Image: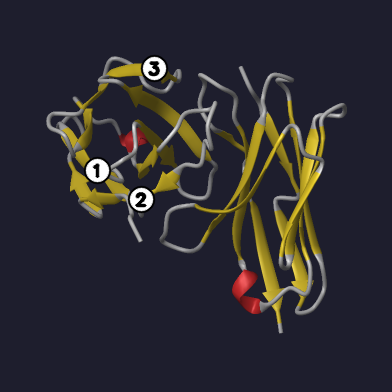
Amino acid sequence: EPEVTQTPSHQVTQMGQEVILRCVPISNHLYFYWYRQILGQKVEFLVSFYNNEISEKSEIFDDQFSVERPDGSNFTLKIRSTKLEDSAMYFCASSELGGGGTGELFFGEGSRLTVL
Amino acid sequence: GENVEQHPSTLSVQEGDSAVIKCTYSDSASNYFPWYKQELGKGPQLIIDIRSNVGEKKDQRIAVTLNKTAKHFSLHITETQPEDSAVYFCAAYQAGTALIFGKGTTLSVSS
């Protein structure tokens, strides 16, 4: 069964360092998302991406964050200068169709980011 | 924007009992309501969903109901089993926007 894969599974970094989290969405999917989940809290929307551009972003997704799809398969989330409060599990998700279609999001297993 | 409230935050049941989790949403334009199950250390997985043109949907032991007028929807799990123990998230989605999650319900099924 096709799945969304994420790397790394866990990254520890020092405050102020740049971090790149990588995702390989399901191959025929067109919509890509990043969500984060601070330990014990709800899953929060960060950004959605379609047709090589951001389609929506939340208040959390400030200038420290960026996303890109550098090639036909990877979808990356970059945090330029990490803060302690960026420590969370980051989930990538993809869907074949947007809200007008099935809308079903398939999630990866997450990348745990720990900022020291 | 959309806001999703979910209750209860924790739910403990005996094996074989039923479990009900309730959610409300704020934006009447939302038209797709999935439920996700998250097991420890894993990403959320879709277990059932419902669209706004349907009032109820069932898949074996799980069912979801939707009341568009009241803007609430519920997950029902019957004949619970220990493997149902997980965190369950409801979510609301509308065309052109993002999937917004509730805060989650930790379900514990004891045998």
Q: Going 33% across and 56% down the picture, which residue do you hit?
A: A2
Position of residue A93 relative to residue B84, above or below, is above
Instruction: Quickly name the residue at label 1.
Output: A23
Q: Are marks 1 and 3 in contact (CB under 8 Å)?
A: no
Q: Between marks 1 and 2, how big is the CA–CA gap?
A: 8 Å
Label 2 CA crowd tier, 10 Å (few <14, some 14–19, many 20+): many
> Position of A111 compared to B106: left or right?
left
Q: Between marks 1 and 3, how big is the CA–CA gap?
A: 18 Å
Tell me the quadrant of the picture where the N terminus of chain B can be found.
top right
Assign a secondary structure to mark 1: strand
Assign a secondary structure to mark 3: strand
Residue B71 found in image quarter:
top right
**Same chain shared by disc 1 and disc 2:** yes
Q: Is residue A116 visible?
A: no
Query: Is A52 or B41 nearer to us in this picture?
Result: A52
Label 1 CA crowd tier, 10 Å (few <14, some 14–19, many 20+): many
Q: Going 42% across and 18% down the picture, which residue do you hit?
A: A56
**Type of amino acid at the residue the image marks with label 3:** Ser
Position of residue A98 relative to residue A38, above or below, is above
Position of residue A103 relative to residue B109, above or below, is above
Query: Is A41 or B23 nearer to us in this picture?
Result: B23
Q: Are marks 3 and 2 in contact (CB under 8 Å)?
A: no
Instruction: Quickly name the residue at label 2.
Output: A108
**Type of amino acid at the residue the image marks with label 1:** Cys
Using the image, tell me which numbered label, if any, was put on residue A55: 3
